Image: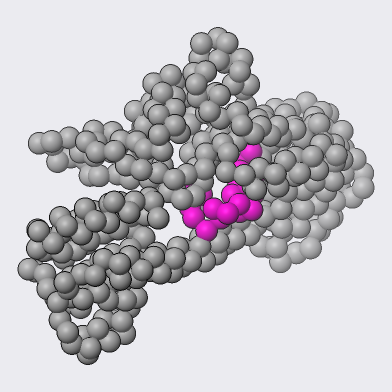
Amino acid sequence: MPNYKVLLVEDDKNANDIIRYRLAKDGYLVTGVFSGTEAISRLETEEYELILLDLKLPDINGLDLLPKLKEMSTAEVIIVTASNSVEVAVEAITMGAVDYVKKPIDFERMKMAMKRAVEKSLLTRQELAINKLVSNNSKFPEIIAYSKTMKTVLESVDRAAASNSPIIIYGETGTGKDLIARTIHLKSDRCWAPLVAVNCANLSERLLERELFGYEKEENKGTDKLQRGSFEVANHGTIFLDEICQTNLAVQYKLVRTLEAGEFKRVNGRSMLSTDIRVIVGSSQKLEKLMEKGKFRPDLYHSLKSFVISVPSLNERKEDIKHLAKYFLDVLSKDSGKKRKFTDAALQILEEYSWPGNVREMRNLVERLIIICNSDVIDIDNLPVEIKTGKSQ
């Protein structure tokens, strides 16, 4: 069961070392701490699938610590105890522990308990992640696809979701590459885990490296705290790197290493961290052309190009324009409590406009019209001059 992160809270150094060694041989990524204070500190910056908690700690009783750990993390907790008291075990499970293991440890028994606990932890995360994604995307959950070109895109989305390969999504700014990536994630086997989106165009090289890989404070400097990067946060899920065409060769090199080895270091970090992740990238420029100009690494391009989806501009999918306009108007009008509609004449004007800002421009226009129009019917007279004249501003 590789790549699952375990926090071991055990004050006995010899026992801590032995447990970490035995579990590492089975592929678990075990972090060992020796006190309740250290455990709380770790959970403030790290996420784990499982916590192994000794009851006798130097600074706090394990049963007193248990509620705090459950409050801070979705990780399941297995109690490790030298006590033969059934009452203690029952109390721990009543307080939220999923199981308990007695010392001296039967490692076969422990591994079985851990397997069940990790499965339960992942199921909990799946439910939370799906609920969060549905909530976050409840306003615009649909991809409108009446045109042949968008129906082809949706067919590609279904095929991409069924695989675990990296994906390149090409499209002009505002075409909805992020929505395509989100839909692929929701339809994939990784839907239970996080989807983390990073816009590479908005960050400097230094900040982008920190955002992607995380950051550890330098020795003898206390100004910066540990920061978990997107590859760490999105473990077992999907990372969407929009406008990857804007990254420089140094960042691209680190991305190649992460994709090939499945591991990375935080900025200023001293140890390698493993990641099991699905990578989707978005680009408004053709990466092969940037590669020919020496602006994009060939090895990164070839690592990413397993599956390519091209999202058409709104001008290339005119059959969808009136449906998108109606959809945005219906969804955005709900907050006002009024049912609004476009006249056929207004929809005709919208279909004739070139939409250089694509779907994003369409949404912003509809939002603007809802604000400025007092009538429940939006007609030609309500449309901005640039829309009626076909000249974008």
Q: Quadrant of residue 60?
A: bottom left
| Furthest-right residue in this view | 344
> In which quarter of the view is residue 207 placed?
top left
Judge whether 54 appears above or below 17 on screen. below
Position above or below: 350 against 324: above
Q: Residue furthest top?
A: 293
Q: Is residue 247 visible?
A: yes
Q: What residue appears at the point 29 percent right and 38 percent down from the top-left corner?
A: 272
Q: Is residue 259 magenta?
A: no
Is residue 259 positioned above or below 337 on the image?
A: above
* Quadrant occupied by the C terminus: top right
Please tell me which residue is depicted at 14% across the width and 41% down the height of the picture: 222
Residue at position x 45%, y 33% from top?
A: 259
Magenta region includes residue 193: yes
Q: Quadrant of the N terminus?
A: bottom left
- Which residues lie in the magenta part? 177-197
Answer with left or right where residue 23 lies relative to residue 343: left
Percent coordinates x, y for residue 283 in the rendering: 59, 29
224 or 165: which is nearer to us?
Answer: 165
Seen from the viewer's position, the closer of residues 250 and 12 is 12
* Viewer-closest of 14 and 212: 14
Image side of residue 119 versus residue 37, left or right: right
Most extreme residue toward the left, as rendered?
58
Please name whichever residue, 81 or 94, is drawn nearer the observer in this view of the structure.
Answer: 81
Residue sitting at the far bottom = 87
Residue 239 position in % (x across, y down): 50, 42
